[in-house]
Image (cartoon, rainbow, N blue to C red):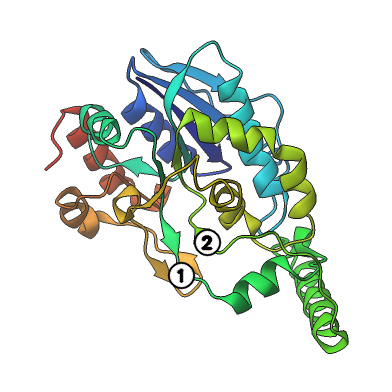
Amino acid sequence: MRHAYLIIAHHEFKVLEQLIFALDDCRNDIFIHFDRKVKEIPALSTQQASLVILENRVDVRWGSLSQIRAEYALFESAYQTNNTYARYHLISGTHLPLKSQDEIHAFFEAYQQKEILRYIYTNAYEVNMKLARYHFFVRHYQHPVNVLRKLAVLGWRILLKLQYICGIQRASPKVSIKANNWVSLTEEAVVAIIQQKDEVLARFRYTFCADEFFVPFVLENQPKKFKMINDERLLFNEFEQANVRLLKRDDFKKLMESDFLFARKFGEREMEVVYNIVDRIRKGKGD
């Protein structure tokens, strides 16, 4: 019953180091994709878990197809190992587990042959806007240079508005579920996702924030084969406007008393809560 942890990382490497320490268990293998923009990959090591740093790195840009490509790199790297995994957990480098590995493995043993996602509210308008329209300039939507970022957002908005005015639509992928891209999947689901890679990359090209739709797209269209479970215990994260709130020392008690398996996001500005959580779960105490 080995688990594969697939980590997408690009910063906050002190948090990542503690995350690896928390996951370092003989029942786990850890795979990390560092954004290609990262110039110096941090030195990381494990004592019990196998640790793989992907050499094939994607230049990840928020909202674009590159996010899906990075996830594919992780799915494929893990699946191509000699190990068979009961679970593939896709997480970020700013996640932390809130339970011990004994508790996490026991939790997922009760969910064999089920795909665990955290659904997010959506509606027909959002699906149509993000998936049935052509989105350009997304690659520079969050460009660090202020002028280029503003020009990209302006160009994106103008071309999107013109599509509504002119009635231009594309064939939208058939999907009704939006879910957090941080998922926990069986090997059967990962195989199906890999097998449909070419179709996924073609269908979701020029879409917007499709990383929240492509896994449900694959699984939803095979309802007899895959059972998706919406379980909010998979992840705790709170939003402040459009951004995930940074968790702090004052959140520690609430997090450790909760039923959540993972939480994000954590940052180097608030390392006290990171050290406290990792110390607690490494001692095997979930409460």
* 35 relative position to 165: left or right: left
Q: Residue placed farthest to the bottom in the image?
A: 165
Give the quadrant of residue 213: bottom right
Q: Are marks 1 and 2 in contact (CB under 8 Å)?
A: yes
Report crowding for label 2: few under 14, some 14 to 19, many 20 or more residues within 10 A (C-alpha). Answer: many
Q: Which mark is residue 121?
A: 1
Q: Which mark is residue 41?
A: none
Mark 1 vs mark 2: which is more N-terminal? 1
Of the pair 115 and 145, the residue shown nearer to us: 115
Q: Which residue is mark 2?
A: 178
Q: CA distance from mark 1 to mark 2?
A: 7 Å
The kind of residue tagged 1 is: Tyr
Would you place residue 80 above or below residue 146 in this image?
above
Quarter occupied by the C terminus:
top left
Give percent across and percent down for residue 237: 37, 58
Give percent across and percent down for residue 39: 69, 35
Give the quadrant of residue 5: top left
Of the pair 84 and 30, the residue shown nearer to us: 84
Residue at x 61% of width, y 40% of height? 71
* 173 relative position to 220: left or right: right
Quarter occupied by the N terminus:
top left
Would you place residue 119 above or below residue 275 in this image?
below
Residue at x 34% of width, y 18% of height? 27
Asked if residue 34 can be seen in this view, the reply is no
The kind of residue tagged 2 is: Lys
Q: Residue placed farthest to the front in the image?
A: 224
* 284 relative position to 191: left or right: left
Of the pair 114 and 23, the residue shown nearer to us: 114
Give percent across and percent down for residue 114: 39, 40
